Amino acid sequence: MNYTLKQIPERTQKPRQSGLTMAMDKGLSIRQTEDFLDIAADHVDIVKLGWATSFVTPKLKEKLKVYKEAGIPVYFGGTLFEAFVIRGQFDDYRRVLDEFGLEYAEVSDGSIDMHQEEKCQYINTLAKQVTVLSEVGSKDEAKIIPPYKWIQLMRAELEAGAWKVIGEAREGGNVGLFRSSGEVRQGLVEEILTQIPPENIIWEAPQKAQQVWFVQLLGANVNLGNIAPHEVISVETIRLGLRGDTFSLYL
């Protein structure tokens, strides 16, 4: 930090298991990536190349090299995994991970129907190759999953070998954990937390009000995901009680 302030919460240090900030790269150029990391690398723990953007991103290997040189792990969005699986190309997907030197992968079923046992088999297989993040929740706002099912899915996927489970919200923050208005499904989150340790969950929270809500509930070292690159510094001030929304949290 640039100067000293009292009554600032202690943040976990990288590489961390809690207090993670997962940023979503939806198509940054190499120069934009370099600028993003120049200001925010200390506050970013992992980057997701959103949905299947990696399929059409030019100079992908060069871009991944920029992240690697900054010590920031990268993974391809779960929608890409689903796109390979539904086409019967899971082995091709595994080869792509190796070809691009990825050490993380996301397993999801937000866009396709997949039996839980099948999903857990994919997690188990990939966990022997890379570190797996597993996303729970549907991208279909009409599909409401009851809390007990979220808990059962998260528990099973962690047992199958997932490093973290991700609570689905999409890049807009209007499905899964949230209502279409962006309002948090508070009862759902609180019930999940009765059974799943918070350090095992990354909560997708792209909207400021959602980030504030989770920090108020779980503190500075809550795991937050789908953070826009230009919002990473802002999120860090929310965590530390240095923005109006959380200003009184630690005083």
Image (cartoon, rainbow, N blue to C red):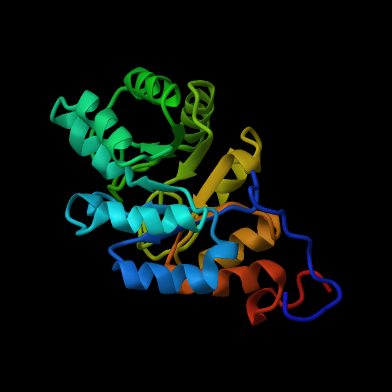
Q: Nearer the viewer, residue 247 or 183?
A: 247
Image vertical order of residue 182 relative to residue 50, above or below:
below
Q: Position of residue 178 (x, y in %)?
A: 44, 56
- Residue plotted at (53% across, 74% down): 39
Q: Position of residue 108 (x, y in %)?
A: 34, 37
Q: Nearer the viewer, residue 145 or 85?
A: 85
Q: Quadrant of residue 95?
A: top left
Q: Position of residue 208 (x, y in %)?
A: 51, 71
Q: Quadrant of residue 110?
A: top left
Image vertical order of residue 186 relative to residue 155, above or below:
below
Image vertical order of residue 119 relative to residue 73, above or below:
above
Residue 170 seen in this snapshot? no
Image vertical order of residue 244 relative to residue 210, above or below:
below
Counting labels gives 0
Q: Nearer the viewer, residue 96 or 114?
A: 96
- Residue plotted at (76% across, 70% down): 249
Residue 251 seen in this snapshot? yes
Q: Is residue 131 left or right of residue 75?
A: right
Location of the N terminus by quadrant is bottom right
Location of the C terminus by quadrant is bottom right
Q: Is residue 59 left or right of residue 13?
A: left
Q: Position of residue 63 (x, y in %)?
A: 32, 58
Q: Residue furthest left?
A: 87
- Residue plotted at (60% across, 67% down): 212
Q: Is residue 90 left or right of residue 33?
A: left
